[in-house]
Each structure stands twice: as structure tokens, then as C-alpha cells.
Image: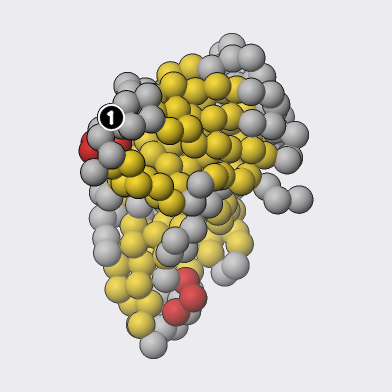
Amino acid sequence: NAGVTQTPKFQVLKTGQSMTLQCAQDMNHNSMYWYRQDPGMGLRLIYYSASEGTTDKGEVPNGYNVSRLNKREFSLRLESAAPSQTSVYFCASSRPRGPGGYEQYFGPGTRLTVT
Amino acid sequence: GDSVTQMEGPVTLSEEAFLTINCTYTATGYPSLFWYVQYPGEGLQLLLKATKADDKGSNKGFEATYRKETTSFHLEKGSVQVSDSAVYFCALSVAYSGAGSYQLTFGKGTKLSVIP
């Protein structure tokens, strides 16, 4: 049981290049999320997917697109990278509605630098 | 909107000292409350949670009590160790009507350094 996995771990892009960050979970969770973490800003939600086939914008969606490929996989795409997108990106997943709180489980992160 | 405010760091303590990290929240609904911990170079891990008023979450010697009257969820540990050095995030989640997922709202994090 690997939990939430992310690839790649590190990436350096030049301004204007594109790339896709991959995320997969093996916990049979319905909901998946993409966050970015910047110093002094905590975590900010970029996009989320409540269930397979649906995606919604979070707090900071500009410059990003997402695809919920199937129940396990949720990818984040940068079409034209900008230096402001230099950050650490975390994917997370959570189980369906139920008792006991709705905690999210996080992947190890992708550290992205845009030069 | 919903928000979480936690004490700014960094916090530096000696080993075996008492730890308190303050967290207060505002929410339009009835939130569940969480503390996450992030060790250097890693993702966030759930440390503890509480889902209703007066619940106490606990794990690894850490505790936090859901106080609805003061809208607080302060994290405490009686005797910290060097291995507790990490960034701690307070977070809340509210299940809004019709929502299929439960977004987390995070505080900005508090960095704790424990020195021998």
C-alpha cells in the first residue's frame, strides 16, 4: 500500500515550457487535490476533484489545468511555466463522506523551479 | 470565508520543554479540526484530529482539544524531543451542503526546532 505517489520529485523548467505532474493513490479514495506550498503562505488549493469525472477550481487555479484520468490518477499541467510557479506541489486524496472527519492524505511533493 | 490563524514561528525549544502552538479558526459551518506535521523534505502527515466540540485528539504525546466557545484548537506536548522538529499546520474542514469533497483550509504553519 503505497498511499499517494507523485512524480517527478524534482523538476527544473525554463519559462514557457510545459510539463505535467503526475499523482496516483491506491486507497480507493473518491476525492483528490492539488496544492502548492510557498514560504510563509501555507498550502493553497489549486484544483480538486470530488469524484471521478469532476474537477473544480480552488483558490489559485490560474496557469494550471488538471485531468482526473480515473479514480486513481489526478494530473496537474502547466501549459506555459512562469517563475511565479516555482513552488512545491502536493497531491492529496480523501475518502468519501462518512463519520470521523475528512482528513486528507498527502504525497511526498514535487519541487518545481522555473527559471 | 473560512480561515485558520496559528502562531507565527519559528519556535525554538530545548529538549523536554513544554510545547504550545496556538490555533484559532473562523468557519461558517461546523468544522472538523486537524493538526498536520511536515518533517523536512517530506509531505504532510496527519498528526491528530477532532470532529466535534470538546473532543480531544491525541497522538505521539501531542494533544489538542476542540474548543467551540473560543474557536480554538491549540496543540500541546508535555516534553518535546529533537525528533519533533518540523513544521506544524492547523487546518479545518467543513462539509458544505451538496459538496462531494471536503476542502481543507490551512494555517500558514509554525516551524518548531528542538535543540538538545
Question: Outermost residue toward the bottom?
Answer: B116
Q: Position of residue B12 (x, y in %)?
A: 30, 73
Q: Is residue B113 left or right of residue B33?
A: left
Q: Is residue B27 left or right of residue B61?
A: left
Please state the chain letter of the residue tagged with numbered disc 1 in the rendered image: A
Q: Residue at x 27, y 64 (%)?
A: B10
Q: Residue at x 45, y 47 (%)?
A: A110
**Which residue occupies the foreground of this view, B81 or B28?**
B81
Q: Which residue is mark 1?
A: A16
Query: Can you tell which quarter of the image residue A104 is in?
Result: top right
Query: Can you tell which quarter of the image residue A18 is in?
Result: top left
Please say if B23 is above or below B76: above
Number of other residues with Cα within 10 Å of mark 1, as a class: few under 14, some 14 to 19, many 20 or more: some
Q: Position of residue A39 (x, y in %)?
A: 27, 50
Q: Residue at x 28, y 29 (%)?
A: A16
**Which residue occupies the foreground of this view, B40 or B25?**
B40
Q: Is residue A53 visible?
A: yes
Q: Position of residue B4 (x, y in %)?
A: 36, 39
The total number of labels drawn is 1
Q: Residue at x 35, y 47 (%)?
A: A12
Q: Amino acid at mark 1?
A: Gly
Q: Can you say which quadrant of the picture contains the C terminus of chain A?
A: top left
Element at badge 1? loop
Please say if A53 is above or below B84: above
Q: Is residue A60 left or right of residue A31?
A: left
**Which residue occupies the foreground of this view, B50 or B81?**
B81
Colouring convention used in this rendered image of the protein:
secondary structure
Please say if A6 is above or below A18: below
Q: Is residue B50 visible?
A: no
Q: Position of residue B102 (x, y in %)?
A: 55, 27
